[in-house]
Amino acid sequence: MQKIRDNLSQLRQKIQQLLQKYQRDPAAVVLLAVSKTQSVAAIETAVLQGQYRFGENYLQEALPKIQALKAYQLQWHFIGRIQSNKIKDIAENFAWVQSVYQLKHAQRLSQQRPAGLLPLNVTVQINIDREPQKAGIMPEDALNFAQEVVKLPNLRLRGLMGLPAAHPDFMAQQQSFKALQAVYQRLKEQGLPLDTLSMGMSDDMEAAIAQGTTLLRIGTAIFGQRDP
Ligand SMILES: *Cc1c(COP(=O)(O)O)cnc(C)c1O
């Protein structure tokens, strides 16, 4: 658990250094700790270091953790593949869903969002490198899709989430993120009130910061390598 504390404080320093390096506002980026496969105790260690936002990919795994940590009033983001039969639980238990790329999922998330809660924050998942095996909206379809999602009453469309191809080199990473940034700017120019560009993970964080990310999704660099 000491390792998690050290990782988190080093990561925060690194993010601040990179924001400075790329001449960005020190408050321009928020950190989402991706806690899939991590124990309640590991998450709690991060919470006690001031970490507030957590991302989970699998509903069954997430629900008991959300329940166990309820007293901390954390902000939970669903970042995994949405299954139709899990939508009600997702709409009831998360503050954000980042992996929206089917209109019927968006519609049902809106329908199932409980009346007593704030609107569910969503980002549209973009298949930025057009990989056939990867889910997400193609860049050229992003505007039409976002214009449908923004109409849904119990959702609040916040922006885009990108899962680029795993590029080993910094230049290629930057190119993917630059393309996503361009889609994001185009949607904003069309009048969509977006404030969130979710891009960058442990291995491509610098490229994402250089290209304007506002939300980093980081697992390994906080919690260490996940068990397969
Ligand atoms: C697992 C995961 C991450 C975190 O990846 P790391 O390389 O461990 O930082 C980020 N985003 C999504 C969608 C993920 O599934």
Image (spheres, rainbow, N blue to C red):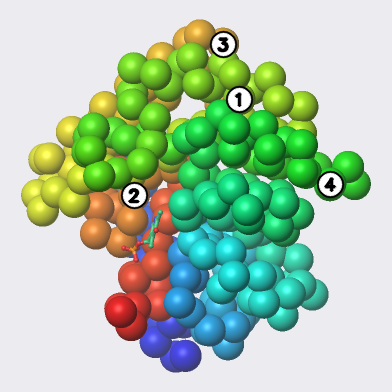
> Sequence-wise, which precedes: disc 2 or disc 1?
1
The structure residue drawn at horizontal position 72% and vertical position 80%, both measured from the top left corner, is: 68
- Locate residue 226, reporting x and y percent: 34, 78
CA–CA distance in space, label 3 to label 2: 25 Å
The residue singled out by tag 2 in the image is 200
- Locate residue 158, reporting x and y percent: 58, 33
The structure residue drawn at horizontal position 57% and vertical position 16%, both measured from the top left corner, is: 147
The residue singled out by tag 3 in the image is 191
CA–CA distance in space, label 3 to label 1: 14 Å
**Which marked residue is nearer to the observer: mark 2 or mark 1?**
1
CA–CA distance in space, label 4 to label 2: 31 Å
> Sequence-wise, which precedes: disc 3 or disc 1?
1
**Amino acid type for the residue under numbered disc 3:** Gly
- How many residues crowd around disc 2 within 10 Å: few (fewer than 14), some, or many (20 or more)? many
- Locate residue 148, reporting x and y percent: 59, 19
The residue singled out by tag 1 in the image is 149
**Which marked residue is nearer to the observer: mark 4 or mark 2?**
4
Looking at the picture, tell me which residue is in the foreground, 156 or 1: 156
**Amino acid type for the residue under numbered disc 1:** Val
Q: How many marks?
A: 4
Q: Is residue 126 above or below residue 184?
A: below
**Amino acid type for the residue under numbered disc 2:** Gly
Say whether marks 1 and 4 touch (CB < 8 Å).
no
- How many residues crowd around disc 4 within 10 Å: few (fewer than 14), some, or many (20 or more)? some
- Locate residue 8, reporting x and y percent: 44, 73
The residue singled out by tag 4 in the image is 114
CA–CA distance in space, label 1 to label 4: 18 Å
**Amino acid type for the residue under numbered disc 4:** Pro
